[in-house]
């Protein structure tokens, strides 16, 4: 029997029992659809996180320090700013942060993040002003009570009125508004739209903290990151007497790699769980093909009696199993792609459909058909012609 004839007969047998064929393929359809949908959403989420981290800058380094008023091992402002002496460092932006309530007459905004910053904050964090100016050296030197409002905070307190040169109350203390940040939206590290900036020295007095607990360091270029980080780590190692639990120096790329690793592991885990449906689908195909062998026993006997060889019978049943699994894989791929798009739109997530995943899922479904089709095909090919012809 030619291959084309075998495929034609396989389709004829499948179409004669449409409902049974659909139910047989259901496990394959669900498995392939689940693998593609979950993998696409997982890879999309990983890409989104990587893009957000990349947006934070691959030449920025986050420095986090232990700090407690009772500790002797703390880092003050001057010690931290000494990092700028390294040729690899372009700018250092130390910060202190607290949460407060801001008021403008009867309008108020609670739970606002108040961040004490230096003049380098604008460069290091790549922020843009909508109006007014940023914190200047004179504000730091004189501990001026001035504030730059985030977009959302400015809108809550002043509506559509320009707040520059007006005043606000921060925990009962009057501050002059010198600027408003341009709207930036939600980011991985939060939103500057819901925060306000005041001079670093003013914030230290406001919070009652003389030491520094965090800073962002901007390196001159990507090639300088590793060397610059090594120098900063060595300085802090000496500062904290070798206790590495009291400080951390991290580049955004290392954070990105860690998150990518976690995301990829979770994506593979979800895909692995979904693949179980494919195995179940394969078992379903094997069971139905065994039933088909029993139903077509007399047909097998007639074919053998008129000259069909063992390999012809085996090929026929094996092709039917492959056709069932291939059709299930193709339908599952279509449903999986559609489901990924619908879920990404409904859940406001990013989906990333990669054709190697689609092709791999369909190919795996065909492989499942081959593996689970061999046993029924072999059983059919081993039937005795005489016994098969006597079967009623």
Image (cartoon, helix red, strand yellow):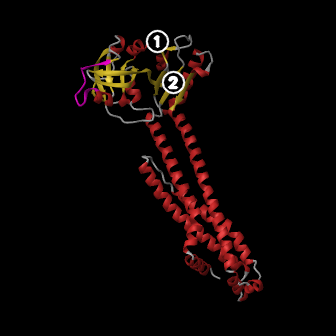
Please name which of the two marks, 1 or 2, marks the residue nearer to the observer: 1
The answer to whether residue 164 is magenta is yes
Classify residue 218 by image quadrant.
top left
Tag 1–tag 2 contact (CB < 8 Å): no
On the picture, is 10 further left or further right than 148? right
Residue 260, relative to residue 383: is it above or below?
Answer: above
Q: Earlier in the sequence, mark 1 or mark 2?
A: 2
Magenta residues: mostly which secondary structure? Answer: loop
> x, y percentage for residue 342?
43, 54
The residue at 75%/86% (across/down) is: 390
**Magenta stretch encompasses residue 103:** no
Q: Nearer the viewer, residue 352 or 257?
A: 352
Name the residue nearer the viewer: 163 or 276.
Answer: 276
Magenta-colored span: 157-169
Residue occupied by mark 1: 210
> Which is nearer the eye, 151 or 276?
276
Q: Mark 1, residues whose alpha carbon is within 10 Å: few (<14), some, or many (≥20)? A: some
Q: In the drawing, what numbered circle is on residue 172?
A: none
User: Left of 171 or right of it: where is 327?
Assistant: right
Q: Farthest residue toward the left?
A: 161
Identify the residue under disc 2: 63
User: What is the x, y in percent for residue 346?
Assistant: 42, 50
Check disc 1 and report its element: helix, strand or loop: loop
User: Is residue 258 or residue 220 the one in the foreground?
Assistant: 258
- Image quarter for residue 290? bottom right
* x 62%, y 15%: residue: 241
Disc 1 from disc 2: Cα separation = 17 Å
């Amino acid at each position: 029997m030619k291959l084309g004839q075998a495929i034609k007969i396989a389709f004829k047998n499948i179409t004669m029992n449409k409902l049974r064929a659909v139910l047989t393929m259901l496990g394959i359809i669900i498995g392939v659809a689940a693998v593609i949908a979950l993998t696409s959403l997982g890879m999309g989420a990983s890409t989104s996180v990587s893009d957000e981290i990349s947006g934070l800058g691959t030449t920025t380094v986050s420095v986090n320090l232990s700090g407690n008023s009772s500790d002797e091992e703390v880092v003050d402002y001057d010690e931290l700013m000494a990092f700028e002496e390294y040729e690899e460092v372009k700018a250092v932006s130390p910060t202190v942060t607290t949460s407060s309530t801001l008021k403008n007459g009867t309008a108020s905004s609670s739970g606002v993040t108040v961040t004490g910053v230096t003049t380098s904050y604008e460069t290091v964090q790549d922020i843009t002003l909508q109006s007014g100016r940023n914190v200047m050296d004179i504000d730091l030197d004189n501990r001026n009570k001035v504030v730059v409002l985030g977009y959302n905070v400015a809108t809550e307190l002043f509506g559509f009125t320009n707040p520059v040169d007006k005043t606000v109350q921060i925990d009962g203390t009057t501050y002059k508004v010198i600027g408003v940040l341009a709207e930036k939206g939600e980011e991985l590290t939060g939103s500057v739209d819901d925060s306000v900036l005041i001079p670093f020295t003013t914030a230290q007095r406001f919070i009652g903290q003389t030491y520094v607990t965090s800073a962002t360091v901007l390196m001159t270029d990507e090639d300088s990151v590793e060397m610059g980080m090594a120098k900063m780590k060595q300085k802090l190692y000496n500062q904290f007497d070798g206790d590495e639990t009291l400080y951390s120096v991290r580049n955004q790329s290392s954070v990105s790699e860690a998150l990518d690793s976690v995301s990829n592991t979770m994506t593979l885990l979800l895909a692995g769980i979904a693949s179980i449906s494919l195995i179940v689908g394969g078992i379903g195909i094997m069971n139905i093909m065994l039933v088909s062998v029993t139903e077509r026993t007399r047909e097998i006997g007639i074919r053998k009696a008129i000259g069909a060889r063992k390999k012809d019978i085996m090929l026929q049943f094996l092709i039917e199993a492959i056709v069932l699994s291939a059709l299930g894989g193709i339908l599952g791929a279509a449903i999986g792609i559609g489901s990924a798009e619908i879920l990404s739109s409904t859940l406001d997530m990013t989906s990333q459909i990669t054709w190697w995943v689609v092709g791999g899922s369909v190919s795996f479904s065909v492989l499942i058909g081959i593996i689970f089709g061999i046993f029924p095909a072999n059983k059919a090919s081993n039937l005795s012609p005489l016994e098969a012809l006597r079967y009623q």
